[in-house]
Image (cartoon, helix red, strand yellow):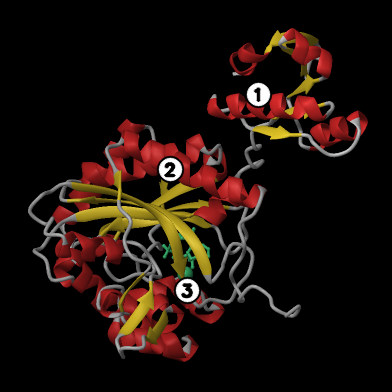
Amino acid sequence: MTDLQPARGTHDLIGDDLRRHRHVAETARRIAGTYGFDEWITPIFEDTRVFSRTLGETSDVVMKEMYTFDDRGGDSVTLRPEGTAGVCRALVTNGLTQSLPQKVFYAGPMFRYERPQKGRYRQFHQIGVELIGPSEPLADAEAIACGWDILKALGVAADTILEINTLGDKESHAAYRDALIAYFSAHQGALSKDSLTRLERNPMRILDSKDEGDRSVVADAPTIVPYLTDAAAAFYAQLKDHLGRFGVPFRENPRIVRGLDYYGHTAFEFVTLKLGAQGTVMAGGRYDGLVAEMGGPRTPAVGWAAGIERLGMLMDAAPAPPAPVVVVPIGDAAEATAMAVLQSLRAAGIRAEMGYRGNLKRRMERANKLGARATVIIGDNDIAAGVAQVKDLTTGVQEAIALDAIAARLS
Ligand code: ATP
Ligand code: MG
């Protein structure tokens, strides 16, 4: 079995990697909580239609990235490639469409069949928020401000910049679509095969293509700005005002369309120059049509998702594990006392370990190796006196402390 490797594009989370991961998810959960978001956990696999109906048949995700298979009962299921569709499905199937707003936070694994590279995996993890109910641009600004606060709390905000765009409303969309069809039809020869399909079904999707040839055509494509209705332009202007009030710096990028079909009005990405081609760390927008696609009433919503791995890569150092206290009994009689002290430390919430192999020197070496902040050395004389020698390894100061006072002293 020695040739077994993790499946391509998957990775184990151990040590610093896991601590980074947890730190990102916990920080995000905490900050999202201050904005009133509560966590939902939806299933990791869903009926395939939850995604195929809603993400857009011409999106990269649906065209080539989904892990879809028939289960043993013959039902087609898909490992979730993103979180929003499942949350909207859950909103409808839990009868929550009349209890708005719903403010959802989620964190968990996502699956996409991609070509693995730095910052791009087949099983990766996302945090995300969905603000379901409000149709005002203030909601968009709040969701974005929450994301910005999370980036700040993680210490990575300085490495990222928010780029925003508007995709307009239905009417703007239709006019823009015609303009794009005219433009791309005139450049068909330079487009990839995928984009020729997109040209027929959803030309806006071409703007999001990663193909080199497509990108040079896209560079000169018309922007949506002249096609915006007054209402759509006003929505966008208000969003920018609100972002200013929240103190979130941004720049406009008319090329942002997002990879999934369900967006309208606001689209945004927090991007960084530090991760090469995988420069988008957090992305989202407004998706007023998605809940209806899922069989619910038309329900406005806005949200974003961020890759935990990409955020972790931007962080300077992984948070250190808590330094333990190591209890070192000298002699057999001391061991029973050491066990009692050990449990009193743990009961006080202190990370504590027993140093029980070898002579005193070996035990102290082990304490050092564990990165101990203190040792509690217990010899026969100590037991007789009801004390132990507590040594603070950062200051080097050692003192005798009553056994039942040790946990309080080290708290
Ligand atoms: P990209 O353009 O990098 O493919 P995307 O537009 O497909 O990203 P979204 O579907 O918006 O990404 O997902 C939101 C975030 O999730 C991304 O900004 C990124 O941080 C993360 N992400 C997406 N796909 C992957 C992946 N395969 N591996 C790691 N992180 C990912
Ligand atoms: Mg992608």
Q: Distance between the residues labelled 2 and 3?
A: 23 Å
Q: Quadrant of the N terminus?
A: bottom right
Is 86 situated left or right of 115 in this image? left
Q: Residue at x 39, y 37 (%)?
A: 31
Q: Distance between the residues labelled 3 and 1?
A: 49 Å
Looking at numbered disc 3 in the image, what kind of residue is underneath it? Arg
**Local SS, label 3:** loop
Dot 2 surroundings within 10 Å: few (below 14), some, or many (20 or more)?
many
Looking at numbered disc 2 in the image, what kind of residue is underneath it? Ala
The image position of residue 363, as x and y in percent, is 85, 33
Q: Residue at x 64, y 64 (%)?
A: 118
- Whether pointer 3 and pointer 1 mark residues with C-beta atoms closer than 8 Å, the reply is no
Q: Which residue is drawn at 42% across and 40% down?
A: 148
The image position of residue 244, as x and y in percent, is 34, 35
Q: Residue at x 52, y 78 (%)?
A: 211
Residue that label 1 marks:
341
Dot 1 surroundings within 10 Å: few (below 14), some, or many (20 or more)?
many
Whether residue 404 is visible, yes or no, is yes
Residue that label 3 marks:
112
- Say whether mark 3 is within 8 Å of ligand 1: yes
**Which is nearer the N-term, disc 1 or disc 2?**
2
- Say whether mark 2 is within 8 Å of ligand 1: no
Is 334 situated left or right of 184 in this image? right
**Which is nearer the N-term, disc 3 or disc 1?**
3
Q: Quadrant of the C terminus?
A: top right
Residue that label 2 marks:
28
- Say whether mark 1 is within 8 Å of ligand 1: no
Q: In this view, does 288 lie above or below 80?
A: above
The image position of residue 269, as x and y in percent, is 42, 54
